Amino acid sequence: MKKLMLIMMAVVLTAGVSMAQVNQSMVDQNGNDQEATVEQVGLWNYSTINQSGDLNIASATQIGDLNFSFINQINSVWVEAYVEQYGFLNMSSVYQNSVWDIANVLQNGWFNTSYVQQVDNFWSEALINQFGDGNWAKVSQMGGIVDFGAILQFGYYNEARIRQYDGYSNWAAVIQDGTFNLADVFQEGGMFNSTLVEQTGYDNWAFTNQIGGEGNNIEIEQYQNSNTAYVDQYDGIMNRAYVGQLGNWNYAEIYQNGGSYNFAGIAQTGYANEAYATQLGGEGNWAGLVQYGDFNFAQSYQDGGMSNSVYSEQAGIANWVTMVQIGGEGNAAEVYQIGDDNMAYTEQIGGVNNGALIEQEGNYNMAETYQVRGENNLAMVGQLGYMNYSGVLQQDVTNSIADVIQTGNYNYSEIYQFNGDNNNAIVTQDGDYNYSGILQNGSNNTAEVYQVGLEHSSVVMQNGNGNSAIVDQANSLNP
């Protein structure tokens, strides 16, 4: 201890005399049972360790001032490398040529940067933690096998990237806590893929792709401020993807290409929302999309069929929704929109258990629903007030029904149900410029239309089989 104090006093005195006091260290090891550790405590730290082959391990810990550290392990075999640097101008690198990789970096504060790159991997891993100031980080792992990623950065100029190329047991994460967040994750060859990105606060972005498929998943949650997010997953199997985003300039896309147990997601609570989701190869499809308020628009499109379903919910301002499902089976689709420039459209082409329900509560309502090849059809609309219109066509129908209720303002509605089975269609319109429609082409038709106030009109045509029709119109004059 006395010896250490004397050395420290000598260092301080020397630093007083000469500004050239530097920690520095280089270690160079060429082959076999290497191991190297360096620890440097203060001032102009710098360290570099090169190791060439066999049972490598390296470490470097630098505790304050102008830290850098580069560790370079080529022709590696049992590589590991840990680096910790606590405060000031941190930087780190670590490059490994790999077999049994691991690399672990932690940098605590000021102008952090860091990369790790592990080339022809086998037992990959790599983790970077950086707690505050100018963060940016990168993890790249190339040949793959038991990959993992990570990068956690808690405050200020965050950025992050993980790429993991030829895959096998992939998984990656990025968690960034606040300020100029951005993140980019990309995993190429598939197997047990996964990705998670969470960013809490300020200029969030996040993009991610997973290309070869198998256990796919992706989750992005970005809590507040200028959110954006894309997600892509190409070759499928257990697809899933979810976005999140709890407010401010939201926008989100999801696109999943090869099919299987699909699900999509997106929920954005407030402000400049937009959202799309597309799933092409089918199987367990279902989508989502919920946006509570502001400049909403949402879309979804599912191509290959099976247990389809989509759902949407937007509560206020410039709403509009599209939903389309093409290959059929358990189809269903729901849309609810409460207030402002509503519109909605949904289409389900290959049939079986069709469904579709739209409810819209106020302002420029409109709604269209087509379900083309039939089976247990149903389509109900709703619409409460202002420029209502409806639509509905169910084409080769079977156990049809289409029900529309419109209560107030420029109502109008049309229902066509063509080539037969148990058709049925009921429209109720309550007030203002009403008109109805309804044509049913064949089987046990029925049609009822009730219209209560102002400029009623109604047309019902039913071409064949068990027809019946009731129309009831009001507007009575007071004596």
Image (cartoon, rainbow, N blue to C red):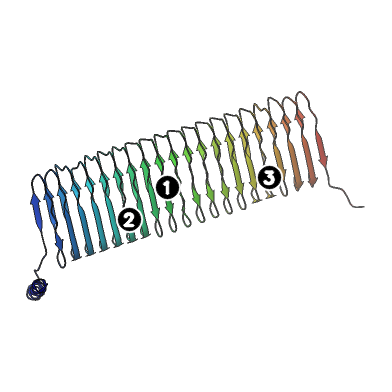
Measured Cα–Cα span from mark 2 to mark 3: 48 Å
Quarter location, residue 171: top left
Write down the residue under mark 1. Answer: 219
Residue furthest to the front in view is 1
* Element under disc 2: strand
Write down the residue under mark 3. Answer: 382
Apparent side of residue 433 relative to residue 255 in the rendered image (left or right): right
Quarter location, residue 334: top right
Residue ID at (66%, 50%)? 361
Mark 2 surroundings within 10 Å by alpha-carbon count, few (fewer than 14), some (14 through 19), many (20 or more): many
Residue 102 position in % (x across, y down)? 23, 48
Q: Are marks 3 and 1 in contact (CB under 8 Å)?
A: no
Residue ID at (21%, 56%)? 83
Q: For this rendering, which residue is in front, 320 or 225?
A: 225
Residue ID at (61%, 47%)? 336
Write down the residue under mark 2. Answer: 152
Measured Cα–Cα span from mark 3 to mark 1: 34 Å
Q: Nearer the viewer, mark 3 or mark 1?
A: 1
* Element under disc 1: strand
